[in-house]
Amino acid sequence: MSGQQPNGGNSSPVFQPLAGDDPATIAGYRLAAKLGAGGMGKVYLSYTPGGRPVAIKVIRPEFGEDPEFRRRFAQEVQSAQRVQGLFTAPVIDADTKGAQPWLATAYVPGPSLADAVVAHGALPVEAVLLLIAGMAEALHVIHGAGIVHRDLKPSNVLLAADGPRVIDFGIAYAADATSLTGSGVTIGTPSFMAPEQAAGRRVTPATDIFALGQVAAYAATGAPAFGEGTSHGVLYRIVHEEPDLSGVPERLMELVSRCLAKDAEARPSVAEVIALCQTANAETVLRRPEDWLPSPVAADITVRAAAPAPAQTPPPPTTAPAGSPGPAVGYSPTTPAVPSTPPPGYGPAVTQPPGQYPQTAHSSPHAQPTQPARPAQQYPQGPPSQAHAPAQHPTPYPMQAQTYPGHLPPQPHPKPQPAKGGRGRVAVIGVVAALVFAGVGGGAAYLAVKDDGKQTQSSDSPKDSGSPDASGSSDASGSSAGGDTGGEDEPKPAAKPDPEPADYKSINLTAGYHLTLGDEDVRPQEGEDGGYDLSYDTGGYLDAENDEGNLVLLDPGQEGSLAVCRADTRFTQNIYVDKLSKGRQICITTGTGHMALLTYQGHSPEDSPSTYMTVDVTVWRNAAG
């Protein structure tokens, strides 16, 4: 998807009116305009309740019908919500399980690099250096979240007044899971792929560095480094031929040529890219002035900053058009909106009971929201649809409940009236019997029912000193076992000892296989999707498959142990293998209560017919509490 930009450069208006086949709302967000469309879906402008503009990207129905796409899309959205960099557009809301998946990112008022170059030509060298340095910082936080962008190209880079913004990170990986990419649906641009990507080999963060070099060449010359033409021709040149850098300025030559190395190992790291930008800038500190872009591009930013205000009249329709996912009950962004007056009628309603404290935005990825279920709200645009409610996230700041026209506060349930006559008597006896069963067991209940309501007995009734309790035992105080001890402290149970570790050395875990840590003999088993404890996904990462499971990548040199794994809370659900070096350790907590420490020992050689990693695993069973 081309992000927040319309197609065709500046030939079409920035804010396009909604057409007949466009929905009026997406999960409670009222749509103000269409921003663009691409291979993965359409992009719309809307607002949060706090008045912050957002870009809502609605995935094409064909992708939503593919279960593997949905699984990968959910994983990537979860990872993307942890990316909070200065040069990224953060993901603030999403629904990966609805009839039509969507995600909302912060709206960036600026043209894409592709639109800017098409409309105004190549950028000056100083602007290119600031552009690439900012993009490198964005890749630093994206890769730090375990994401490889895979589709870094000029249309996925937005030019804002204070620097570039990288968007759509991780979405291309989900698209790779579907068969649609081979049936007429185009995802990505061949001109900006890396050789290993074009050849179908393993994708790593170095893949994004190659694309960064291509973006730099495009920004400086106005043309792709490997030319244009048919996809097959471009991909062949990327894999087998050298780029055309004849138009690249001398100050950018080292930066571009090193990034475009065919060998992924020879490409610079993100930190080295930033250092190369500083060297090209006469080794001075890169400073981003307010006018870092040419004035014609800056004028495009001004146009996009004037986002259309929501119309207050006429009132919105009471029903969503056909094909609309419909509004949802709640809205819970992962980052707070700008506190300003919300445009009337736009954005889903915000409801949180007064006095309810928020949870932190960076809690465990598997934590569930703790706030109580709320009654369905009535919105100006019509009743919400429960079928497409997005997953609730912890609200990062307290908000007061709001009441909309037509919304009545919940009414208390009427107190049940006691039954009259024989039915009331039978009901009382039934209740007493149930209470007695719960308190002391069947013997006392038998006495209560036998006397036909004339006599009842429970474990809470007074007894003579030393009388036996329901189990036939008594104590000196006359109270039944397990009853009130008169305030005396009961002895605390002894702490449960730590389980003995079970060690498994030199496991060759093949891509597409998994480990089940509860097995007596922990060994690879085929399958990478399911309720397994740990799998090596063919996408190149370790995955905590179990719903309640998580992983923690320990720091280089940090020595793992059961105590360390219990204390560390830097949870994630997947870790890319290319981030691992020999001796790096990963803490594993499974949804079945086991804990483990994985030590990475190496990866299969290039000439191996299979892809696998060699790991040592230490398991503490039933240690997770």
Image (cartoon, rainbow, N blue to C red):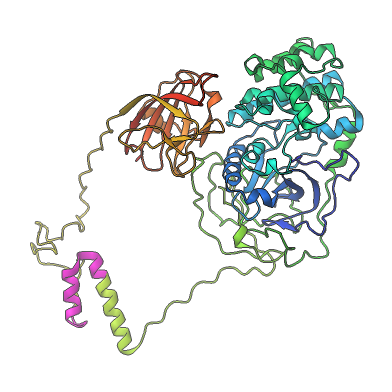
Q: Is residue 588 above or below residue 185?
A: above
- At horizontal 47% and vertical 40% (from top left) the residue drawn is 545
Q: Is residue 158 above or below residue 241?
A: below
For image coordinates 66% across by 28% down, the residue present is: 197
Is residue 543 placed above or below 139 in the rendered structure?
below
- Is 125 within the magenta? no
User: In the image, 523: left or right of 198?
Assistant: left
Pick the front one: 60 or 273: 60
Q: Is residue 131 visible?
A: no
- In this view, which residue lies farthest toward the bottom? 421
**Mostly what secondary structure, the magenta segment?**
helix
Specify whether residue 447 is painted magenta: yes
| Quadrant for the N terminus in the image | top right
Quadrant housing residue 296? top right
**Position of the C terminus by quadrant:** top left
Write the start and end of the magenta stretch as one range. 435-455
Q: In which image quadrant can residue 127 be found?
A: top right
Across and down, in percent, residue 146 comes to 57, 31
Placement of 147 over or under 346, stated as above or below: above
The spot of residue 180 in percent (x, y) is 68, 44
Q: Nearer the viewer, residue 373 or 405?
A: 373
The residue positioned 61% from the left and 52% from the top of the image is: 399
Specify whether residue 75 is in view. yes
Q: Residue at x 35, y 88 (%)?
A: 420
- Relative placement, left or right, of 598 versus 259 is left
The x, y position of residue 384, in whole percent, is: 65, 63
